[in-house]
Amino acid sequence: MRVGIIGLGLIGGSLGLDLTAKGYEVIGVSRNPETCSKALTKGVASTSGVDFSLLKGCDMVVIATPIEYILPTLKNLVPYLSPYTVVTDVGSVKESIVASAQEILSNFVGSHPMAGTANSGIDAVEKDLFKDAPCVITPNDNTSVRAIALVEKMWLSVGCKILTTTPTIHDQAVAWISHLPVIISANLIYSCLGEKDEKVRIFAEKIASSGFKDTSRVGGGNPELGLMMAKNNQKNVLNSLKEYQNKLDTIINNIESNNWSEIEQLLKTTQTKRNDFLIDN
């Protein structure tokens, strides 16, 4: 299969690396010529350049750009595609993308691999990044069965576990387990920076260990990605934040009231139920 990838950062680049290793012919496109050169050196693509014309003849094209560039990229890409070329994306928001994308190209299929690190760019690519990771496919009533099958085949080939749901359910669920954690994690860091006693803040920086490292990781990631999550999934992010705030207020009230039994019950529940949200549970 001949696969084009537009956007050669962590996700697009890592996908190209794995597909190339599997024997796919990968055509990489980036706005940055230096990134294209690195893609060839790192084995991310067999051909790479800045021109969409390189993608003529591709069986599939993956748009691995930031969310807000997906639709503009698709519009610019269409003149270079055959009637049979399937296009998918890797964006973490689907409701605002899928319907509009299918108006531009009927062979569009929304997908979202749930994989990543705090790093970004072509230098952050990782082999086997998608191994055992969920990849959500979000078809609607207008999505071609052939196109879905081709997209699933590609993601399965790099080790993903395929899940299928609607764009609406995807965005509501992702707000809870991906977008909300980014905002909360960022606010943890921001709140620590707001410590008024400089001696306390400096000492906290010195002793921060695994607990802070784990809970602050996603808040210390790519700012552009976090911003686009909030902007493009605004309704669901706000709903999850407000519900989180309600539960946080309850926790504060229980601590102020010395209601330790409620705090204990909360911690017992979260200890038991955390595994329900882990991939390898």
Image: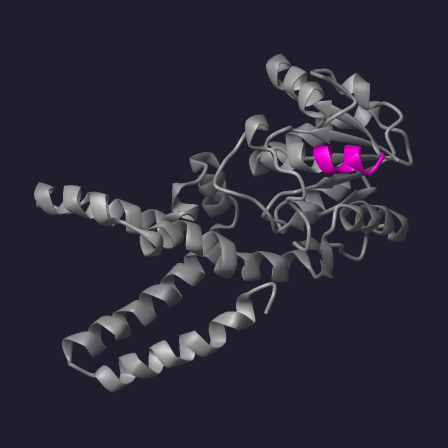
Q: Residue at x 86, y 29 (%)?
A: 58
Left/right of residue 42 with respect to residue 189 in the rendered view: right
Q: For residue 9, what is the image quadrant?
A: top right
Please provide percent x and percent y for residue 167: 66, 56
Please provide percent x and percent y for residue 278: 55, 65
Left/right of residue 74 with respect to residue 124 in the rendered view: right
Left/right of residue 198 with respect to residue 36 in the rendered view: left
Quadrant of the snapshot with the N terminus: top right
Please provide percent x and percent y for residue 41: 68, 19
Q: Farthest residue in the top direction?
A: 33
Q: Residue at x 36, y 49 (%)?
A: 213
Left/right of residue 194 with respect to residue 281 in the rendered view: left
The stretch drawn in magenta includes residue 184: no
Q: Residue at x 73, y 30 (%)?
A: 5
The stretch in magenta equals 16-23
Please tell me whether residue 84 is drawn above or below residue 43 in the rendered image. below
**Picture mark count:** 0
Please provide percent x and percent y for residue 199: 9, 43
Please tell me whether residue 102 is drawn above or below residue 142 in the rendered image. above
Is residue 189 visible to us here?
A: yes
Q: For residue 68, what is the image quadrant?
A: top right
Q: Nearer the viewer, residue 47 or 110?
A: 47
The stretch drawn in magenta includes residue 17: yes
Q: Residue at x 39, y 53 (%)?
A: 214
Q: Nearer the viewer, residue 141 or 92?
A: 92
